Image (cartoon, rainbow, N blue to C red):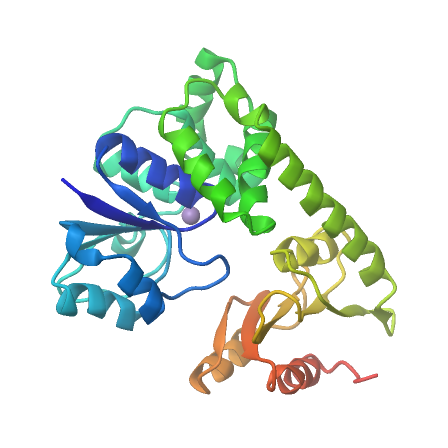
Amino acid sequence: MTILIITHWDTDGISSAALLKRMYPDSQVYVPRIGEFSLSETELEKLELNKYEAVFICDYALPRENLIYLKKKIGMKTVILDHHLWKAIEGIQIINPIIRGESLSMYPSTTWVIKTHYSLELSIPIILGVVGDHGYKATGLRVWRMIEIYNRRVGIDIEQLNEAVELIDSNYQVMDIDGVYSAIDLLSNIKDIGQIRDNDRWIRNRELFNQELEELEKRALDELRDEKYVFFDFSSKYYVISPLARRFAWKRGIPILLVNRGFFEDRDQVFIRLPYNYNVDLKDLLINLQEEGYVAGGRSDVLGVITSKNDTDVIVKRILKYMNWSIS
Ligand SMILES: [Mn+2]
C-alpha cells in the first residue's frame, strides 16, 4: 500500500515514522515545517495527495480544517496514530488508547501506540520514542519494566538512550530538516544504537544547539526582575524556547517569561514556564487567549503563544499583568 506518513519532527515522531516505513516500504514521509502546527495550502498542493491510498498522521496535532480537507476534499483514508488528546472527527480513524481512557504510563509515546496496534516486538525506535517524550522520567513508567529486560539483553541503558535522543532532537532544534529526514531513514533499519552516536552531522547540530542554549542562558540570567522572575526578550533562529525555559523553571526554580523575535519571519514566540507547585495557574489565561483566537497552547504551568509581530507586546503585557509582575 502506498501511504503518506505525516509526522512530528521530534524523536517520538521520527521513530514512529521509521516503524511505519518498515511495515510499508513504499510509503513517503512528510515532516511539516518545523515550529508550525498546520499545513498551508501550498504545502498540501506540493504533497500531490492523489498519489496515495491513505495518509497516516503520527504524534502531530493538525487543525480540524486540515483533517477535514484530507478526508472530504481528497477523500483519503485518514488514520491518526497518537497519544495526545484529540476530539473525535467523523470518518477519521483515531488509534489512540489515551482517548479511550488508558494511562500515559502504559502508552507513553506514539511509538508505543504503534507497537501495540501492530503487535510489534520491542525495538530501538520504540524505546527511543518513549525516552524522547519522557527523558529520565521514562524509568518510572509502567512500560519501563519491559524495556529494561530488552535493554539488558542488548546491552544498552538510559544514558545511552538519552544521548541518542539529544542527537536526534538536535536536528529540529537547529532547524536542520534534512537531518530530521536522515534520522527517519537511519531508524527505519537501525541495528545498533552506536549508529546514532557516530553520526557526525547530528553531533555537530547538538554542539551548535548547546552553544546557543548556554549563551542565551547566561544572558537570561542578567534579566532577573525584582528577584523573583526572569523576563528575557531575545532573537534566535533555533527552536530553543522550551529547553531554555526548563533551565530556569526546573533547574533553578525561577519562573521565566521568554520572547523569541527571531524564529519566524512574520511572527514571534512568547512563552512562560513556572516552577512546580508555583502559586499561579496559567489555565484561565490560556483559555481566554484561545477564545480570543490566539494560537496558544499549554497547561497550568506552561503557556506558549505564537503571535503576529504587532500583537507581541500586548500579549507580554497581558502575561505580566496576569502574573502580577511589575512592568519595569
Ligand atoms: Mn509523542
Q: Is residue 15 above or below residue 38?
A: above
Residue at image location 26% in from the left, 36% down from the top: 116
Which of these two is toward me, 62 or 135?
A: 62
Which of these two is toward me, 303 or 207?
A: 207
Q: In the displayed structure, does residue 98 sit left or right of residue 70?
A: right
Give the image location of residue 164, x and y in percent.
Answer: 55, 31
Residue at image location 62% in from the left, 68% down from the top: 271
Residue at image location 73% in from the left, 51% down from the top: 213
Give the image location of residue 32, x and y in percent.
Answer: 40, 56
Residue at image location 58% in from the left, 33% down from the top: 162
Give the image location of residue 202, x and y in percent.
Answer: 59, 35
Q: Quadrant of residue 197?
A: top right
The quarter of the picture where the N terminus appears is top left
Q: Is residue 94 above or below residue 307?
A: above
Q: Would residue 136 be seen by someone viewing this image from the given angle?
A: no
Q: Is residue 115 above or below residue 28?
A: above
The quarter of the picture where the C terminus appears is bottom right
Q: Quadrant of residue 100?
A: bottom left
